[in-house]
Image (cartoon, rainbow, N blue to C red):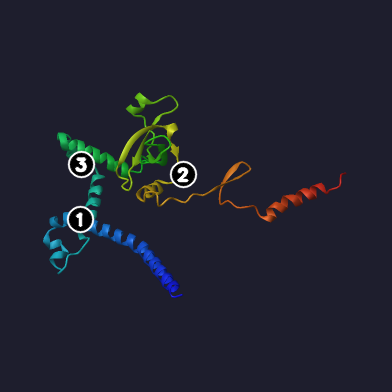
Amino acid sequence: MSDAPKTSGMTRLRNYFLTGFVVCAPLAITAYIAWSFIGWVDSWVKPYIPARYSPDSYLPFPVPGFGLIVALILITLIGFLTANIVGRAIVNFGERLLGRMPLVRGIYRSLKQIFETVLSNKGDMFRQVGLVEYPRKGVWSLVFVASEKETEINQKLDQEGDPLIAVFMPCTPNPTTGFLMYVPKSDIVLLDMTIEDGAKLIVSAGLVAPEVKQMVVVNGEPINGELSNPSVAALAQPARRSRTASSRPNK
């Protein structure tokens, strides 16, 4: 009889530990990443700040995040100056100089195009999540579908009525690496989940999946909702109407 309370107590302690771990682990990892990022930016910016403007010169301890604040202010100031005619002329002059450097110009143009695509609001990002059969028939892989654009690949390989679409198949658990593939539009199964939900599904290796609303079909039309039996009142109401209609005397 003494074993039952011990087993129950150990089970509760284990559940308490797992609950606390689930709560603390994401907070700790997030804090660690944020702290590492702040320290990395400070290590790059602080050496270029004059000593008379740095609070570390007047305090007995370093101030974390000061370099990050200075970097944000400088980036915003550069963006303000670039929006003007003079600043745009300076940027164009610098880009022309970089364009004359054989190795540097390719790296700069590629990085600039990537950042402009990611940070712009032109809708050039991945627009939908889909499934393609890969690496063999019957096995499906999650992909991010890019916007349809007319490229040289489409001009040479497109079939009539079934254009090729660029899709990115990320790897688990790091969605920043993967494979770029051009797949016929008919071979892509589009999903309703968002890009964020698809990224969570990849990072968690399928453990964190978005909730799916079941579809209820009424009179041939799908309706979002939960599956359930009709209520007694709903069943009885048409019956009463039919009895009322049938019980009327014929004139």
Dot placed on the residue nearer the N-terminal end, 2 or 1: 1
The percent coordinates of residue 135 (x first, y second) are 37, 36
Viewer-closest of 93 and 166 = 166
Front in this rendered view, residue 115 or 171: 171
Q: Residues within 10 Å of mark 1 (few under 14, many from 20)?
A: some
Instruction: Identify the amino acid type marked 1.
Output: Trp
Residue at 35% x, 49% y is 203
Residue 117 appears left or right of 43: right
Q: Nearer the viewer, mark 2 or mark 1?
A: 2
Asked whether residue 100 appears in the rendered view, the answer is: no
Q: Residue at x 15, y 64 (%)?
A: 56
Q: Residue 123: where, in percent of width, then height?
A: 37, 41
Lower position in the chain sequence, tag 3 or tag 2: 3
> For the C terminus, which image quadrant?
top right
| For residue 112, side relative to residue 18 (left or right) | left
- Of tags 3 and 2, the one toward the viewer is 2
Gap in angstroms between the C-alphas marked 3 and 2 = 42 Å
Numbered disc 3: secondary structure: helix
Q: Which residue is mark 1?
A: 40
Q: Where is residue 225? Give x, y as percent.
A: 56, 50
Q: Earlier in the sequence, mark 3 or mark 1?
A: 1
Residue hosting label 2:
192
Q: Amino acid at mark 3?
A: Val
Reading the image, the residue beneath label 3 is 91
Distance between the alpha carbons at the discs numbered 3 and 1: 27 Å
Q: Nearer the viewer, residue 232 or 62?
A: 232
